[in-house]
Amino acid sequence: MTIRSVLIANRGEIAVRIIRAAKALGIRTVQVHSAADAEMLAVKLADEAVDIGPPAPKKSYLNIEAVIAAAKAAKVDAVHPGYGFLSENGDFADAVVAAGMAFVGPSGDAIRLLGDKVSAREVAARAGVPTVPGSGGRVLTLDDAHRIAERTGFPVMVKAAAGGGGRGIRIVETLADLEKQFPLASAEAAAAFGDGGLYMEKVITRARHVEVQIFGDGENFVHLYERECSLQRRRQKVWEEAPAFELPQVVRKKLCESAVALAREVRYTGAGTVEYLYDEETREFYFIEVNTRIQVEHPVTEMITGVDLVQEMLKVAGGAPLSLKQDDIKPRGHAIECRINAEDPFKDFAPSPGTITKLVVPEGKSVRFDTMLYEGYTIPPFYDSLLGKLIVWGETRSECLERLAKTLEGLKIEGVPTTIPLHQTLARSAAVASGAFHTRFLEGWLETDFTETKTKSAEVA
């Protein structure tokens, strides 16, 4: 069927992004919202809005029955989950389909299969994708954990089997530490994800985080090349770029082909991301996980390929065959995305909800700002602190960095502290310009290079 109407089961900047993509296709949009989000931009832009409950996510955005009821009442053809909330909930995908609507994403079975980190590793292995040395499955007892750690060597990473978003992860350096952390990790995983299952992986020192954008329609599968996501704070991505910095072409080819092989193995439908750790010293890469949804950082891929991934998701969910052919996807230039959060980088990134008193966004064909903001908008304290994503493109990485630095100077968000100063410093960092980063780089950089910026700021104040 052709999708004529879609309900957006999300909030914030991704809801705005979906609405704009849908309207470009002539699709009617219905936006659900909590009581706290009645004034958000997505509500103002949508053709129709439905209140689905109180501010607490469990009573609104995570309430499957409320979302399905809203979709039925609005008589939509499809539901787009965005990212976060119910986007990787297989039961939600099944409920949408059972209610007679299209789910804009993979099937519930595919979400469950790839959402569990252990079964996803098994799928990757069947598809011939290298996996990080580790347990190979769930670790059921502490004795099993001992044997695995002795085989792989320390440090090891204890991870929640049902985890995601950088949560449910503990790095263990010794056997004594493992004995202490293993039961704590299981309890934490059970509390956060409703599943206390764990698995273990060898820690790849100074690894880079590289991911591949995949897309499929169940029969045809392509990749849209890779993204570099190594700049992370507490395992949360802060800055992403495409393509990955100085990735050897032979590695890029193998990496992207392996991601497509995995998509083919499960007959994947929609947009997804296959994440890897890349060891620069050995030039080896290892599978981490699959995100069965649109990613926060998808705009950098769109900027270098010219493909609107959200529009393509809507078309494929409506039954259209994949319009992309691998030979037609030719990346050009370089793009960088900065996640702008309502956090104070000078006060240990404390959340800072409040009212936006001024918003100035630089314009240009090589600049894009995906946001939920408008002047006078009051940021509610109940949700993620992401305000928007600044994406800049250049013919080369150095040109992109220079344009990014100038654009950040012109981006004005007043009324609340934001992470713009952090990104301004990163954009001018010699270490970032040289590509001398890895997944642990930013934590150290914040204590050294950025500390100087904080000190100067305090002196000025």
Image (cartoon, rainbow, N blue to C red):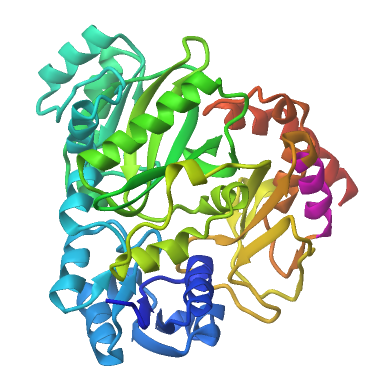
Image: magenta residue range: 400-410
For residue 207, say whether it is visible.
no
* Residue at image point 38% right, 59% down: 84
Judge whether residue 116 is colored magenta.
Answer: no
Residue 369: percent from left, percent from top: 66, 62
Q: Is residue 51 above or below residue 297?
A: below
* Residue at image point 64% right, 49% down: 338
Residue lying furthest right: 460
For residue 242, say whether it is visible.
yes
User: In the shown orientation, is residue 209 left or right of residue 447?
Assistant: left
Within the image, what quadrant is residue 197 found in?
top left
Q: Is residue 450 above or below residue 4?
A: above
In-front residue for pair 33/127: 127
In-front residue for pair 291/61: 291
Within the image, what quadrant is residue 40 found in?
bottom right
Q: How many marks?
A: 0
Residue 394: percent from left, percent from top: 74, 44
Residue 296: percent from left, percent from top: 49, 54
User: In the shown orientation, is residue 307 left or right of residue 276?
Assistant: right
* Residue at image point 41% right, 80% down: 33
User: In the shown orientation, is residue 300 left or right of residue 366?
Assistant: left
Judge whether residue 409 is colored magenta.
Answer: yes
Main secondary structure along the magenta-highlighted residues: helix
Q: Is residue 312 above or below residue 55?
A: above
Residue 392: percent from left, percent from top: 70, 51
Q: Is residue 242 above or below residue 59?
A: above
User: In the shown orientation, is residue 165 left or right of residue 395?
Assistant: left
* Residue at image point 80% right, 37% down: 428
Specify the quadrant that holds the N terminus.
bottom left
